[in-house]
Amino acid sequence: MEAQTISVRFINVLLMGASKHSTYNEKWITKTGLSPALLELEGTRITMSKFAQLYRVLAIELNDETPGLFSRPLRNGTLKYLCMIMLDAPDLGVALNRFRNFFHLVNDDVEYKVRTCPNGLIKIELEEKNNLGPTRTWALELLLMLVQGVSSWLIRRKIPFVSIAFPFSKPGHAAEYEQLYPGPVTFNQNETALYMDPVYLHEPIRQDQSELNEFIRNAPLNWFYFSPNDRPYTHQLRHYLQNRLHENVTINDVALIQHISPRTLARHLASEGTTFQKTKDKLRRDIAIDLLNKTDTPIATIGNKLGFEDPAAFNRAFKMWTGSTPGAYRKQTILQI
């Protein structure tokens, strides 16, 4: 999978929940190759795979698959059993009803509800039964990711939800939602919900138990929403630039390859909420973070690989992206070589 990064905020709220357990141990952080000091750097980003690795470590060590988020821990194996009872459903609609009923048995704080709206859309709603405390936002974010991840996996198809609603104000990390949720997100709503086209309820279940262990092993990374079909021009651009950043490719070069004008390519990217330079910079950022985490490649070499001829320019760009210089970032990172 192409390197993807996420705000360190998600690590910190994950740890905030996990620390509610009396057996929580900070040493578990370093098991994943993360330094606690790195997590204190404002603006820092980490790879999605590193986040998922820490999530799994905490779930195993705490015997809680939603680490510290709810009044009752979700014991290890619960999500696997949930998926098992959904696998022999005839279609997604029946599977979601089983999901709702099962979750009602294992969680006292939040209840899933599946309803048909007057306009015909299907609403998957989270109803809060108890106060979720300071990790409320993260708990609601996670539970929506869970239901979308499991649903898409069951039918082997990413579901493009019509809209996603949250009851809280737009958070500072809202820009991260474009890679978390498959649809437009609204805030300050009276509900936490996903809205989907009813046609997906009739999709047959296309997975079986032979696929289940891999799905559980890769969780929660496979709950995140990565769909090239949702932003095709952005995805194609990232893919094309992946091994060409050192060549200082321009929008004119890419447009020529795609047999369209630079203006047309710019218009397509704008329709997906980005620009050529923004896409290029995000790719540079993600690759830089990945290399700083996983290799001992000299910083100057990384900068050259990303198309920075001047190390000072790379330092300035990286600090703008993450809040720290490449050298400071690496010093706080335990290398996984």
Image (cartoon, rainbow, N blue to C red):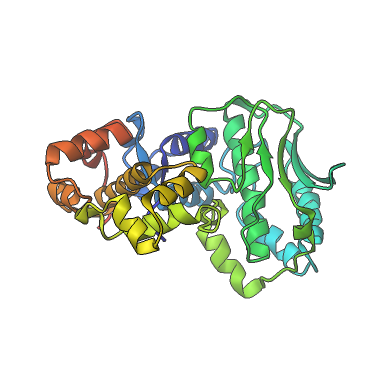
In this figure, what is the number of numbered marks?
0
Q: Residue furthest bottom?
A: 210
- Quadrant location, the C terminus: bottom left
Residue drawn at the location 34% of the way across and 35% of the way down? 44
Percent x, y of residue 294? 27, 54
Q: Residue furthest right?
A: 118
Residue drawn at the location 58% of the way across and 38% of the way down? 68
Q: Is residue 103 left or right of residue 275?
A: right
Q: Nearer the viewer, residue 148 or 101?
A: 148
Q: Nearer the viewer, residue 146 or 225?
A: 225
Q: Is residue 121 left or right of residue 59?
A: right
Q: Nearer the viewer, residue 290 or 35?
A: 290
Residue drawn at the location 42% of the way across and 51% of the way down? 265
- Quadrant location, the N terminus: bottom left
Q: Nearer the viewer, residue 238 or 331?
A: 238
Q: Is residue 173 above or below residue 254?
A: above
Percent x, y of residue 123? 77, 44
Residue drawn at the location 54% of the way across and 45% of the way down? 180
Q: Is residue 253 visible?
A: yes
Q: Is residue 37 visible?
A: no
Percent x, y of residue 150? 65, 57
Percent x, y of residue 238? 38, 55
Q: Quadrant of residue 108?
A: top right
